[in-house]
Amino acid sequence: MLFYKDISIYYEKIFPLNPAAVEFLEEELDGKKKILDLACGDGKYSDSLLTPDRSVTGVDLDKGMLEEAEKKYDRKNNIKFVYGDMLELSSVFKRDKFDGVFCIGNSLVHLTSPDKIKKALTELNLVMEDGGRLVIQIINYDRILNDDINFLPTIKNEDTEFIRNYHRYGNSRIIDFHTILKTADKEIESHQELYSLTKDELVFLAEKEGFILENVYSSFKKEEWNNKSLQSIFVFKKNRNNEL
């Protein structure tokens, strides 16, 4: 995860808080009192969902990102940030149970096989209350695979440029996510492997692990999903013990 360590101080400029994402999460997690921000990054979405009667826990595997989150937000009583692996959530949270979980920012596909993704969903099931809500946002890999997409739109602002390219290894489902971050005085280049997880594949894996699909959207504005959309946003409910 050296890439995220390298760009942690620029992360907020590259990926500023998206008001539409905050509104979406507020609606889908309405009434939930104990929220888990899975792969929380710099913590801005954890902070955005705080209310006087709600606690939010952010967990991430990147210490540089967690340092940024703690620096900005950890002084508040009902928020905390924890170092942990999404493949080991039941060990990280031995006593805690969450009634709402969100994992956005294309984070889930950093797990580079269906078995690892299935394991993460198993771990989520173990740390969630029955009837809890799970929101997952990833790039629309149906589009990436079907249309042989090899880049994502470049992100530019006043003093940074973030170039994102995809390279697929033949017919493999593994994608080399090649990025270049340009600032006024340096360039940071990185490669990160991602798994090209399709919509139907994620739904299948989640349902096997005790989650019920409620909706799939193409944006945080709740536009209908289609195979040409740029992203896929899933809303699941954790199955109650006796619910079919």
Image (cartoon, rainbow, N blue to C red):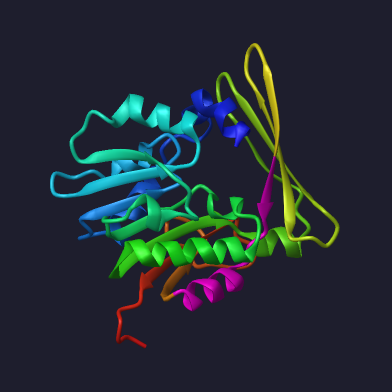
Q: Is residue 177 left or right of residue 222?
A: right
223 versus 106 height, above or below: below
Place of residue 18 in the rendered image (x, y in percent of width and height, measured from the top left):
42, 42
Q: How many marks?
A: 0
Q: Is residue 199 magenta?
A: yes
Which residue is situated farthest in the left direction here?
53
- Residue 191 falls in which quadrant of the image? top right
Q: Nearer the viewer, residue 103 or 124?
A: 124
Above/below status of 65 relative to 198: above
Write down the region rendered in magenta: 192-209
Q: Nearer the viewer, residue 235 or 132?
A: 132
Q: Is residue 27 above or below residue 193?
A: below
Question: Which residue is more in the foreground, 233 or 103?
Answer: 103
The residue that appears at 49% across and 60% down in the rendered structure is: 120
From what the image shows, is residue 142 above or below residue 161?
below
Q: Quadrant of the C terminus?
A: bottom left
Quadrant housing residue 25: bottom left
Q: Which residue corresponds to the image point at 49% horizontal and 71% vertical from the top-left?
A: 206
Residue 205 within the segment the image draws in magenta: yes
